[in-house]
């Protein structure tokens, strides 16, 4: 059973870059035919897919965020990461990492990131 | 890109049946599988229906999913409502460009 855990700063200043890492356990990030994705949920609002990386390294991003998002994988650490640049208060949300194929099968517990000076 | 539209909220009494709809704005609902997630406050979402109408192990058979091509929508039906079913429910699908989309979510109140 896969387990995912998000980590990173809980507070980011406006205009800076949000960086989060997801550590995967219970399976290899490079050996299974999974996508590794990021989803966010602003307080009191719904889920928004940010983007995903395939185990082969191909990346797919939400068109509304594409210009600011980078997702990468570090197979040596069994981790994948999210970078979101030029953040504003609108990027304040709980950020989840998840493994998925057509649907999202395993989720991390989520981490709240607040954008504020 | 397409959107998935859900009612903001639904409510029903314990023991009754409720149906939550999810309408796809463009492209056929039947072209790509629909998943449904349950999210309780403070918790991560969990899958209650995958591939339109399949239940993961451990999900009661009170939960069922379907699609209707005539209305280009998917539905989640919960029968024999229990207070523990009170939660937010999200539909989710994807497109041929490997973009994944969530519906806006529906708050289910069991009163």
Image (spheres, coloured by chain):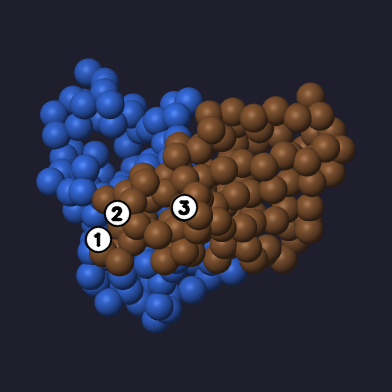
Chain colours: A blue, B brown
Subunit bearing disc 3: B
- Front label number (3 vs 1): 3
Q: Residue furthest front?
A: B70
Residue A69 shows in the view: no
Residue that appears at 73% across and 46% down = B78
Q: Is residue B43 above or below residue A114?
A: below
Residue for badge 1: A60
Disc 3 from disc 1: Cα separation: 25 Å
- The answer to whether marks 2 and 1 sit on the same chain is yes
- Front label number (2 vs 3): 3
Q: Identify the secondary structure beneath mark 1.
A: strand
Q: Residue B21 placed where, x, y %?
A: 57, 43
Say the numbered circle drawn on residue B72: 3
Q: Picture quarter containing residue A100?
A: bottom left
Residue that appears at 22% across and 18% down = A117
Q: Residues within 10 Å of mark 3 (few under 14, many from 20)?
A: some
Q: Residue B80 placed where, x, y %?
A: 84, 44
Q: Identify the secondary structure beneath mark 3.
A: loop
**Residue B54 falls left or right of residue B67:** right
Q: Residue furthest bottom?
A: A31
Residue that appears at 61% across and 45% down = B38
Residue for badge 2: A51
Q: Are marks 2 and 1 in contact (CB under 8 Å)?
A: yes
The quadrant the C terminus of chain B occupies is top right
Mark 2 or 1, nearer chain start? 2
Which one is nearer the viewer's eye here, A107 or B14? B14
**Residue A115 falls left or right of residue B65:** left
Disc 2 from disc 3: Cα separation: 25 Å
Q: Are marks 2 and 3 in contact (CB under 8 Å)?
A: no
Subunit bearing disc 1: A
Q: Residue A63 placed where, x, y %?
A: 21, 48
Residue B66 shows in the view: yes
């Amino acid at each position: 059973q896969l387990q995912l855990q998000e980590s990173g700063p809980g507070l980011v200043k406006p205009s800076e870059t949000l960086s989060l890492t997801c550590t995967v356990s219970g399976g290899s990030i490079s050996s299974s035919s999974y996508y590794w994705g990021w989803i966010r949920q602003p307080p009191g609002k719904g889920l928004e897919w940010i983007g995903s990386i395939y185990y082969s390294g191909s990346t797919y991003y939400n068109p509304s965020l594409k210009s600011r998002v980078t997702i990468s994988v570090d197979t040596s650490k069994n981790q994948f990461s999210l970078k979101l640049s030029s953040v504003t208060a609108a990027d304040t949300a709980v950020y989840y990492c998840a493994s998925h194929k057509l649907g999202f099968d395993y989720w991390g517990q989520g981490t709240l990131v607040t954008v504020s000076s | 890109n397409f959107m998935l539209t859900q009612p903001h909220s639904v409510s029903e009494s314990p023991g009754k049946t409720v149906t939550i709809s999810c309408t796809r704005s463009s492209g056929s609902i039947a072209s790509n599988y629909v998943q449904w997630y349950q999210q309780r406050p403070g918790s991560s979402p969990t899958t209650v229906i995958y591939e339109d109408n399949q239940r993961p192990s451990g999900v009661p058979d009170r939960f069922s999913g379907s699609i209707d091509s005539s209305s280009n929508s998917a539905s989640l039906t919960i029968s024999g409502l229990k207070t523990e079913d009170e939660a937010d429910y999200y539909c989710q699908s994807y497109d041929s460009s490997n973009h994944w989309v969530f519906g806006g979510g529906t708050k289910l109140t069991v009163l």
